[in-house]
Amino acid sequence: DQQVKQNSPSLSVQEGRISILNCDYTNSMFDYFLWYKKYPAEGPTFLISISSIKDKNEDGRFTVFLNKSAKHLSLHIVPSQPGDSAVYFCAALSGTYKYIFGTGTRLKVLA
Amino acid sequence: KAGVTQTPRYLIKTRGQQVTLSCSPISGHRSVSWYQQTPGQGLQFLFEYFSETQRNKGNFPGRFSGRQFSNSRSEMNVSTLELGDSALYLCASSSYGTSGVYHEQYFGPGTRLTVT
């Protein structure tokens, strides 16, 4: 049972445009969410997080939005750059000490 | 500050054998988690250790085990390897302790295990 879902396995965006990556979750008890970026042959790198008491968090070109009623979060990258091409994972903190990850979305930013 | 290191980076084993993977966390981090990544499955949580104690465990068979040492280094062991155990095994460390404050995890590069 996949509690954190990324329904789009891949996404292509033109350089300079906005990239929107989506993530849905099923457990309303999740209260902390994170986004990671992963390049081939490397471990995931932390990007940005959001607590359930907020609905938006920004860090430079990256913004995460949380819609608790819809159990949905999204990552916006503006403007998208070719170096952003990677696999993006969303994750949720389940109870304590256990992070549940989605299956990832492969983003390709076209120059 | 040095990042999370994992050894070995690549490993080829035969069905039925056992394997031990090692992880050294970021200095000062006492929480170490292990994940299995396979194509299409994302990162599946194996277990998490803090101060040599396993605090949480994922839904993996008992062939998967781990431990943590007093210096926070951790090892993961898989016994009686099966073909389906071929995957990238990732270790992550965090300063997440007992305060309840949320902390992100920092990942190592992973160990690519191939079972033939």
Image: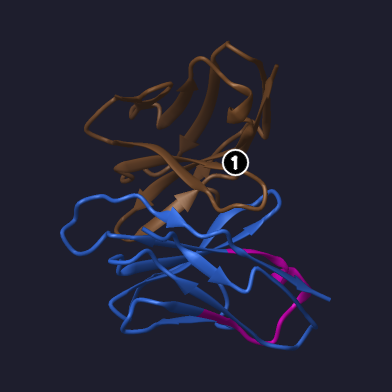
| Residue sitting farthest toward the top | A17
Residue B77: x, y in percent?
56, 82
Residue B10: x, y in percent?
70, 70
Indicate yes or no whether the magenta region holds residue B77: yes
Q: Quadrant of the C terminus of chain B?
A: bottom right
In this rendering, the answer to whether A22 lies above or below B59 is above
| Residue sitting farthest toward the right | B116
Q: For this view, does B107 lie left or right of residue A19? A: left
| Residue sitting farthest toward the front | B1
Q: Is residue A3 visible?
A: no
Residue A6: x, y in percent?
57, 36
Q: Nearer the viewer, residue A67 or B113?
A: B113
SS type, badge 1: loop
- In magenta, the rendered stretch is B76-89
Q: For this view, does B78 lie left or right of residue B73? A: right
**What residue is shown with label 1?**
A104
In this rendering, the answer to whether B25 lies above or below A90 is below
Q: Residue at left 55%, top 53%?
A: A43
Q: Which quadrant holds residue A83?
A: top right
Indicate yes or no whether the magenta region holds residue B90: no
In this rendering, the answer to whether B31 lies above or below A84 is below
In this rendering, the answer to whether A56 lies above or below B103 is above
Q: Which chain is brown?
A: A
Residue B12: x, y in percent?
77, 76
Q: Amino acid at mark 1?
A: Gly
Q: Which quadrant holds residue B4?
A: bottom left
Which chain is mark 1 on?
A: A
Q: Is residue A104 visible?
A: yes
Q: Which quadrant holds residue B60?
A: bottom right
- Disc tally is 1
Q: Nearer the viewer, residue A69 or A88?
A: A88
The shade of chain B is blue
